[in-house]
Image: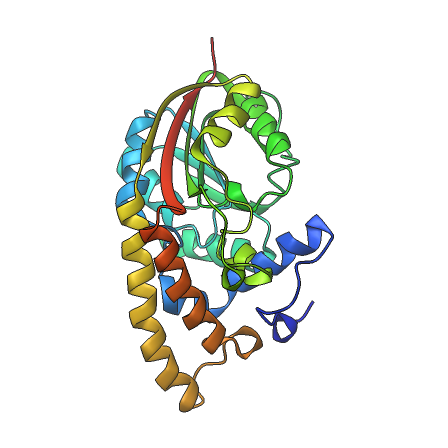
């Protein structure tokens, strides 16, 4: 699938693999880095570090970073806590770029990336001391399957740290369609539904904290960067996927309204696998 075909106003594909492919291609595009930066989630690397401490990472830990993207979180946690990190992502381009960056940072011995599907993890049972998943669980079409996979690869006593979009109301038509999947909104769930997925998978949820202000700050920052993107598009220096700059601006404005109304939010969870 060519990136130029990903017009945000297109209907959502019926096939779950197509949805994953669409999102992976968008996140690898230069526009994603321009609008959001290296850390493609609310709260940025500060929240990542907080989650790392909450799941008790140390130099003996082996962490699985699910939907690792550019590897920014993996690099931070490896350097901050001294842990080993295996990152997985659905996008082959993101995996290649992250491994190249690991080599550049001289971290290849402790941080590596491979292409994999979160709903079908290619690892043995109890292979990891901790699992991290930031702003991606809401993108998985089969959430209960992904939750069971997280629990399966965790060692007894291992911990899961997860942050994600929450949704507690109906969305306007402007917040629907393919772009809503790309923005992690389409299949976001209420906080208690996330908790239920993890508990049904056999994990004990220890904390669930809201970080709605972090989501507001991210959307506001994107709105400012969209103004700059407008100039770059006019100069021919940036080509947004599908030419969707106007759609992106409208989407950001509607998302900000939904956050203010309490329909959209952001939360971080910590769960543990029983011994």
Quarter of the rendering occupied by the N terminus: bottom right
Q: Nearer the viewer, residue 268 or 156?
A: 268
Q: From the viewer's perspective, is residue 153 above or below residue 250?
A: above
Image coordinates of residue 7 in percent, x first then y, are 60, 72
- Residue at image position (73%, 53%) is 14
Q: Is residue 58 visible?
A: no
Q: Is residue 98 visible?
A: yes
Write down the quadrant of residue 256 in the picture: bottom left
Q: From the viewer's perspective, is 207 left or right of 183?
A: left
- In the orientation shown, which residue stands out farthest toward the bottom? 235
Count of marks placed on residues: 0
Write down the quadrant of residue 202 in the picture: top right
Image coordinates of residue 29 in percent, x first then y, are 50, 67
- Residue at image position (49%, 51%) is 185
Q: From the viewer's perspective, is 260 left or right of 111?
A: left
Image coordinates of residue 16 in percent, x first then y, are 69, 49
Q: Nearer the viewer, residue 173 or 59?
A: 173
- Residue at image position (58%, 76%) is 242
- In the orientation shown, which residue stands out farthest toward the top? 275
Image coordinates of residue 3 in percent, x first then y, are 61, 71
Write down the quadrant of residue 13 in the picture: bottom right
Q: Nearer the viewer, residue 111 or 204?
A: 204
């Amino acid at each position: 699938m060519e990136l130029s075909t990903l017009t945000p106003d297109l209907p959502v594909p019926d096939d779950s693999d197509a949805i994953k492919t669409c999102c992976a291609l968008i996140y690898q595009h230069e526009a994603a880095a321009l609008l959001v930066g290296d850390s493609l989630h609310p709260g940025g690397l500060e929240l990542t570090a907080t989650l790392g401490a909450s799941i008790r990472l140390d130099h003996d830990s082996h962490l699985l970073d699910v939907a690792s993207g550019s590897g920014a979180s993996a690099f931070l946690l490896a350097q901050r806590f001294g842990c080993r990190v295996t990152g997985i992502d659905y996008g082959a381009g993101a995996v290649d770029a992250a491994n190249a960056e690991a080599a550049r940072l001289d971290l290849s011995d402790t941080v590596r990336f491979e292409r994999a599907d979160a709903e079908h993890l290619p690892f043995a049972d109890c292979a990891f001391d901790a699992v991290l998943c930031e702003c991606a669980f809401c993108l998985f079409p089969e959430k209960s399957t992904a939750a069971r996979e997280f629990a399966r690869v965790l060692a007894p006593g291992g911990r899961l740290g997860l942050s994600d979009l929450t949704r507690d109301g109906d969305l306007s038509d402007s917040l629907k369609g393919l772009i809503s999947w790309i923005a992690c909104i389409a299949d976001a769930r209420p906080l208690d539904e996330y908790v239920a997925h993890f508990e049904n998978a056999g994990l004990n949820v220890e904390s669930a904290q809201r970080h709605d202000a972090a989501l507001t700050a991210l959307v506001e920052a994107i709105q400012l960067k969209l103004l700059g993107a407008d100039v770059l598009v006019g100069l021919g220096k940036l080509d947004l996927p599908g030419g969707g700059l106007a759609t992106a601006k409208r989407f950001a404005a509607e998302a900000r309204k939904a956050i203010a109304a309490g329909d959209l939010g952001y939360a971080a969870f910590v769960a543990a696998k029983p011994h």
